[in-house]
């Protein structure tokens, strides 16, 4: 298994870079909420009307998709295997990955539609 | 060792030992064996096992040098992997009880003896020997003292298997993840100034499992009876792979 992005190093970098984007987005939102407390609808709406914030949120959502896809795949390849679950292992793993793909793509695409 | 010690100078210790004989047992069980150890001196866990074997002669375990050099008597001692021959009873015994099990994650052959094939198969994959392309020099391939120092903390591994069998990533994927012992040896040869196969070695490790299944929980560091640091070696290989990209 060469990795989802072609090699183990590419996967490792994708997880680390996406986690930095997720962290910076979370820190910025926390800073925004604290520095503008009490927060109201107009402030929140104004924040997400800004194009820079829309691009930042898009980056966040793509990072979320990449990070969770690699992460859930890694969990599945540890615990949902032939060796651990017997004959049904591969089918359970396939089903699990389909559910993960469905949830991750729905969350990402739906959020992008809301933002843009 | 003399086992006929005056009563007032001994204390009782209960060894709870994993027993499994595939020839007669359907499943494994724990057997309590009480032994008397001298109160005024500290034995090693291996000595206690030898005392237990005098009472229960069918008890099986590997041992050889008895001084932490051969790596034969790796086992799970009160929940933590270690070498029986260099683990003092005073450190291992809790409330006069000592629980001994085979190293986890490998098939049990009998009692405390595990089948190490998977472990050595993974070691073989990292080609743990010097690979050179230049013609052999007349006498020897030389290293500066600084280059030789790079190998300290790497060459001392005795391949006891304590680290790899303490690693959950190795438990889950023992055929795909190489494990801390094999990766420490991999770095030992990547770091060797005389080796000329660094690129090939790195190529072999650059998949989703061989190296990158290490999540850095450092169980390997915590159990290594030689005080080595496989996590650091893995991190060094990872840095080398990332630097190669840039």
Image (cartoon, helix red, strand yellow):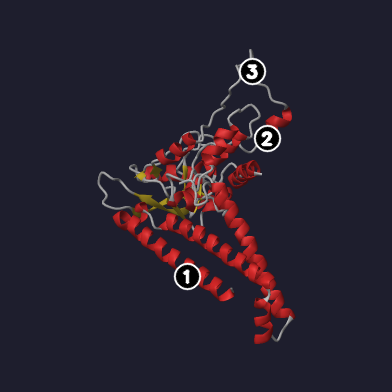
**Both labels 2 and 3 in a single chain:** yes
Q: What is the number of the mark on residue B158?
A: none
Looking at the rendered structure, the secondary structure element under dot 3 is loop
Which residue, given by chain and number where applicable, does mark 3 sit on? B140
Q: Residues within 10 Å of mark 2 (few under 14, many from 20)?
A: some
Q: Chain of mark 2?
A: B
What residue lies at 35% left-to-right and 60% top-to-bottom?
A92
Residue B119: give x, y in percent of width and height. 45, 40
Q: CA distance from mark 2 to mark 3?
A: 19 Å
Residue A35: give x, y in percent of width and height. 74, 79
Give left or right: position of A63 versus B100: right
Q: Chain of mark 3?
A: B
**Both labels 2 and 1 in a single chain:** no
Give left or right: position of A88 versus B166: left
Residue A109: give x, y in percent of width and height. 51, 69
The quadrant in which the C terminus of chain B is found is: top right
Q: Earlier in the sequence, mark 2 or mark 3?
A: 3
B52 w.r.t. B148: above or below:
below
Q: What is the number of the mark on residue A106?
A: 1
Q: Chain of mark 1?
A: A
Which residue, given by chain and number where applicable, does mark 2 sit on? B150
**Both labels 3 and 1 in a single chain:** no
Q: CA distance from mark 3 to mark 1?
A: 63 Å
Say which of marks 2 and 1 sits in front.
1
């Amino acid at each position: 298994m060469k990795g989802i992005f072609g090699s183990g190093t590419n996967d490792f970098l994708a997880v680390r870079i996406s986690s930095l984007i997720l962290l910076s987005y979370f820190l910025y939102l926390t800073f925004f909420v604290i520095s503008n407390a009490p927060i109201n609808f107009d402030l929140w709406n104004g924040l997400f009307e800004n194009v820079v914030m829309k691009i930042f949120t898009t980056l966040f959502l793509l990072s979320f998709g990449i990070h969770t896809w690699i992460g859930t795949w890694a969990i599945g390849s540890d615990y949902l295997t032939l060796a651990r679950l017997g004959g049904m292992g591969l089918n359970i793993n396939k089903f699990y990955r389909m559910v993960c793909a469905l949830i991750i793509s729905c969350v990402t695409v739906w959020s992008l539609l809301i933002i843009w | 060792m003399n086992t006929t010690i005056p009563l007032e100078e001994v204390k009782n210790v209960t060894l709870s030992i994993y027993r499994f004989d595939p020839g007669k047992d359907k499943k494994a069980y724990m057997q309590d064996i009480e032994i008397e150890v001298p109160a005024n001196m500290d034995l090693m866990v291996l000595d206690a096992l030898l005392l237990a074997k005098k009472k229960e002669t069918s008890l099986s375990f590997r041992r050889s040098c008895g001084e932490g050099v051969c790596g034969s008597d790796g086992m799970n001692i009160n929940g933590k992997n270690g070498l029986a021959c260099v683990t003092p009873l005073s450190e291992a015994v809790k409330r006069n009880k000592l629980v001994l099990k085979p190293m986890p994650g490998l098939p049990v052959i009998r009692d405390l003896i595990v089948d190490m094939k998977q472990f050595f198969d993974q070691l073989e994959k990292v080609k743990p020997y010097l690979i050179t392309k230049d013609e052999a020099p007349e006498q020897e391939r030389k290293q500066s003292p600084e280059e030789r120092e790079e190998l300290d903390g790497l060459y001392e591994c005795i391949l006891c298997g304590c680290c790899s069998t303490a690693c959950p990533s190795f438990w889950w994927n023992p055929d795909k993840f190489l494990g801390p012992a094999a990766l420490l040896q991999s770095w030992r040869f990547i770091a060797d100034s005389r080796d000329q196969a660094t690129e090939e070695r790195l190529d072999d490790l650059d998949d989703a499992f061989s190296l990158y299944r290490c999540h850095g929980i450092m169980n390997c560091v915590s159990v290594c009876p030689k005080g080595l640091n496989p996590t650091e070696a893995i991190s060094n290989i990872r840095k080398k792979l990332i630097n190669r990209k840039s």
